[in-house]
Amino acid sequence: MFFEKGLDPTSMDAVAQHAGVSKQTVYSHFSSKEDLLQACIRSKLDAYELQGSRALQQISLREGLTTLCLRYISLLYDDNVLRMKRTVMGSATAHPEVAKLFFDAGPRATLDTFKNFIHHHVRGGGLAVDNIHEAADMLTGMLASNAHMGSVLGVSTPLDEQARRERVESCVAMFLSRYAADKALRET
């Protein structure tokens, strides 16, 4: 409903009716429309396994980083995510609190996952990073690119799976060439 009607016109009453449940049932799970929106965003991050990276910390640095980046870039090009970003961008001026809520629950939470992954590998000696926030921000920025912004704006088609994989491999190689502690890993 957020995608179809936008954030403002979507009421909890309408959500309850659409779900075929009582308004009381909706409110027993979500205290507000904002809470519901956050749950939608967390659900999407969970679907792409972007809420934490513990399992990825158990495999090689390159493999874990590649997997994390592939999950992230797939999330970026998810049709519902693209629509949600359009909706949020369209209402950000009138409703900055909703934009902040979206940013905190989505992009900021995802950046934290990247930061945690990088931090783990810094502690383990695989990465030599002085500013973890900056490194994670640069990596996610490389993955997003102008191609993603064109898709958000609807002026270009989303990257297909092969193009996403190529972008991820390139970004991972660039990231490791800058931050890998092992010289051999920086050169592959």
Image (cartoon, rainbow, N blue to C red):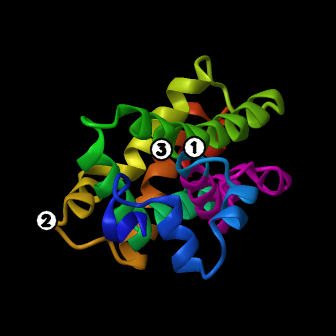
| Quadrant of the rendered image containing residue 79 | bottom left
- Which quadrant of the figure contains the N terminus? bottom left
- The magenta segment: 36-65
Q: Is residue 41 magenta?
A: yes
User: Mark 3: few, some, or many residues within 10 Å (few <14, many ≥20)?
Assistant: many
Instruction: Give the amino acid at mark 2.
Output: Val
Query: Mainly helix, strand or loop, the magenta region?
Result: helix
The residue positioned 50% from the left and 25% from the top of the image is 134
Task: Decide: few, some or many residues near mark 1? Use Cα within 10 Å; few <14, some 14-19, many ≥20.
Answer: some
Marks 3,1: beta carbons within 8 A? yes
Residue name at image x 72 percent, y 36 percent: 116
Q: Is residue 78 visible?
A: no
Q: CA distance from mark 3 to mark 1?
A: 5 Å
CB contact under 8 Å: marks 2 and 1: no
Q: Nearer the viewer, mark 3 or mark 2?
A: 3
Q: Give yes or no for residue 47 being in the magenta stretch.
A: yes
Residue linked to disc 2: 155
**First in sequence: mark 2 vs mark 1:** 1
Kind of residue at badge 1? Ala
| In the image, residue 113 above or below residue 81 | above
Q: Which residue is mark 1?
A: 105
Residue 126: quadrant of the picture? top right
- The mark that comes first in sequence, 3 or 2, is 3
Helix, strand or loop for disc 2: loop
Q: Which residue is mark 3?
A: 102
